[in-house]
Amino acid sequence: MGKTNKIKKLKFRIKALKAALTTASTHTHAVAPLAPASFPDLPVIDGVRFAAAEAGVKYKGRLDVMLAVCDPGTSIAGVFTRSATRSANVLDCQEKLGSDPAAGAAIIVNSGNSNAFTGRAGAGSVKAISETVSKVTAVPENRVYSASTGVIGEPLPHDRITAKLDELSAALDPASLGLAARAIMTTDTFPKGAMAEVSIDSKPVKIAGIAKGSGMIAPDMATMLVYIFTDAKVEQPVLQDMLGDLTNQTFNNITVDSDTSTSDTLILAATGASGVAVTAETEAFRTGLHDVMLDLAHQVVRDGEGATKFVEVRVTGAANDADARTHAMAIANSPLVKTAVAGEDPNWGRVVMAIGKSGAAADRDLITIHFGDILVAEKGWVAESYREDAGAAYMRQDTLLISVDLGLGSGEAQVWTCDLTHGYIQINADYRS
Amino acid sequence: MGKTNKIKKLKFRIKALKAALTTASTHTHAVAPLAPASFPDLPVIDGVRFAAAEAGVKYKGRLDVMLAVCDPGTSIAGVFTRSATRSANVLDCQEKLGSDPAAGAAIIVNSGNSNAFTGRAGAGSVKAISETVSKVTAVPENRVYSASTGVIGEPLPHDRITAKLDELSAALDPASLGLAARAIMTTDTFPKGAMAEVSIDSKPVKIAGIAKGSGMIAPDMATMLVYIFTDAKVEQPVLQDMLGDLTNQTFNNITVDSDTSTSDTLILAATGASGVAVTAETEAFRTGLHDVMLDLAHQVVRDGEGATKFVEVRVTGAANDADARTHAMAIANSPLVKTAVAGEDPNWGRVVMAIGKSGAAADRDLITIHFGDILVAEKGWVAESYREDAGAAYMRQDTLLISVDLGLGSGEAQVWTCDLTHGYIQINADYRS
């Protein structure tokens, strides 16, 4: 790279950092009370470079486009929303999943407009963006994965994005994943990042990911956009299987409001730059990836719209795992449970109600309920040892565990959710204006 | 009846009316903005008498128990919650449904405590109350239908109810159905009543009903407590079939918050006192009963916790009726749709999102959406003729129609719901204290 180019690139990076600061300071919502203390210092993943820019898709003066370019040999795995009205970008990504890794890959994401329910024009926007990305990055078009997040049903002004691609391409840098995390935010109140470093045959392998939430967070698929990168060398089918399994243990077990996005996308890119081969049996890698995914999933819940409490719902003793999950989700999605949590009311009667309505097997008189370590109810009634003031004191914490044992079998599930507060109403009753 | 008794009865009635006034004026919540202008002047249904009293189950100074006694020959039909954690009263009513009508029937309901998830003690309370009702009314115990509504999981102080039964029995009066409507209220902001008079073979038949809501209002069964009386003569199996059919067209198509109560009970009593026989084919009666049920169901939605908008969701063109109902319920229950309605935001993108997540068949590019008469979206995109200011003006009304045509088949459904507001959070984040 010549000095002129280097200077150009550094200047661009400074501009992006300034925009990130503006994004952070002009954000309309205060940072969620459950936010982590700070954004993690994400490691460089060899084999992939990032850039972010202000394209003015909807708002001016904030980062709203990210570009990632992966080296040849990168395997791409993906999990997407199962919505019947999914966006043009999702349909396009799904088609491209099996393509040849030898050619590398590019990921392009904008916030501000979801390009969902935009008719034939939506597919046209995806095509225009993919073509331009391919032209400026030399990655073939069938290896360009796009996503759009924001308002549904308004035409995507894709020219504003394509106009920025030369600039983005010139600015690509291995250290810019944190900027990318900021560019994909919509109603998020903090950028979300997570990392793991695992040792395989005494060699280090790195995993780093970013995510955005934070409304329409529901079981199938739980998050809106997640991008995870690793320098491990993993064959695509192995990577895809692993991603599917771990999604069921992480992102598919979180819920904010039971609504499902039309754009949910989770992409995992393995560049292979570490030279360390990973198979389906490499437990250290699987564990590291699981931890990064769970961390990001929890951050999405912690930034759930209006959330003031992080709640784990753990169900045991169900007839089977599927029943356990049905009960756990019924509890986690119940507006009456969620408002009781918001009001710091140990209203276990509403937990019983949610179990009753879930449709899965339950015997009223075999149910045991704990709040944290406090035995609340057993044998179909409030526990003799239970004291309301102990329950009320527990509910004042900002991280809560609601455990239910059904006494029927060995089915288990764990889901994570947040409370339902005035903040959720405020954010959503006036999102578009 | 001797003069002393008559005076006693009139005095009791005055006391109950005063209590009803206190109930109305000390109610913690302001009357819902969607409430009807006034409580209807319900007709006397020959063959059934009512009384209401203050038993102090939870709160002092308000009516909280109602008793209804039906003459011998009354057919009783019932529909109940399908919750797996349903209350002791519901289980007891379900057992008693097939019993002999020759003996008459009694209905006893308290508010303030739901007697749900109260273990073996719950069944004991039902037994104690039923026994005492049987003793004072001479109705056999297997014809005493009880219900309790209010907080879950606290022991029902049934002695306070049984202590009032002599008084209640002495006060029974055909004109007291309106007092009964007030005695069964919990978080309701107005008492709910509806009536119809139909002509069958030129003879008049009357139908009158009362209901209470207004949280935990969800598809299976939609309302908490409904009691409907008619002087028609109907065999129990015919009455039961008719009630089931019409419940699917009315109460099972309303939703406030997708939560399902443990106590939902709908009882229909046909005294036969008019001497007019009704069969499954008597359309005039079926229509009259349908209208009373739909009216009460709509009133439950209009008193939905925090509701400021009454919303009809109409789905047509689905692959079949079941799919249509799944889509309609997904729209009606979506927190994002409900908050958009609260914010008067014509955010049709959220309607598309809800269709997509419902799980029923949909083709994005065949969906047509109307708000009232305004064509909003068609062919997978916003309609060319649509103007946002027209949509916004429409949303400012307090009664809204959201119509969706899926363009797939002839499946249809209609459901009714309300918006999700700060009021809902206020009421439910602090209900027990």
Image (tube, coloured by chain):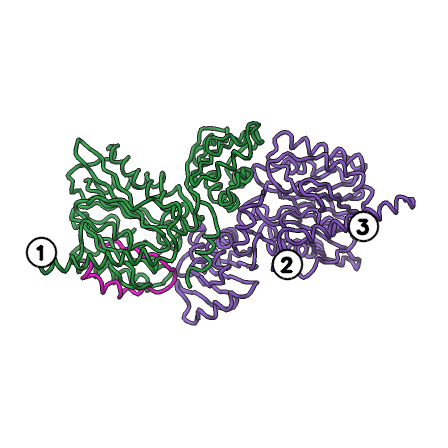
Chain colours: A green, B purple
Q: Which residue is mark 2?
A: B35
Secondary structure found at label 2:
loop
Residue under pointer 1: A1
- Which circle marks residue A14 in the picture? none
Tell whether label 1 touches label 3 (CB within 8 Å). no
Q: Quadrant of residue A262?
A: bottom left
Q: Are marks 1 and 2 on the same chain?
A: no
Q: Is residue A159 magenta?
A: yes
Residue lying at the far left of the rendered structure: A2
Marks 3 and 2, the one that precedes in the sequence: 3
Query: The residue tagged with tag 1: helix, strand or loop?
Result: loop
Region in magenta: A142-168
Question: From this viewpoint, is residue B75 visible?
Answer: no
Tell me the crowding category of disc 1: few under 14, some 14 to 19, or many 20 or more residues within 10 angstroms, Cα based.
Answer: few
* Chain hosting mark 2: B
Instruction: Give, as a three-letter code, the residue at label 1.
Output: Met
- Percent across and percent down for residue A95 are 28, 52
Total numbered badges shown on the rendered structure: 3
In the displayed structure, does residue A377 sit left or right of residue A125? right
Q: Chain of mark 3?
A: B
The amino acid beneath tag 2 is Ala
Q: Quadrant of residue A417?
A: top left
> Residue B14 got which mark?
3
Query: x, y percentage for residue B41?
Result: 75, 58
Q: State the CA–CA distance, disc 3 to disc 1.
A: 95 Å
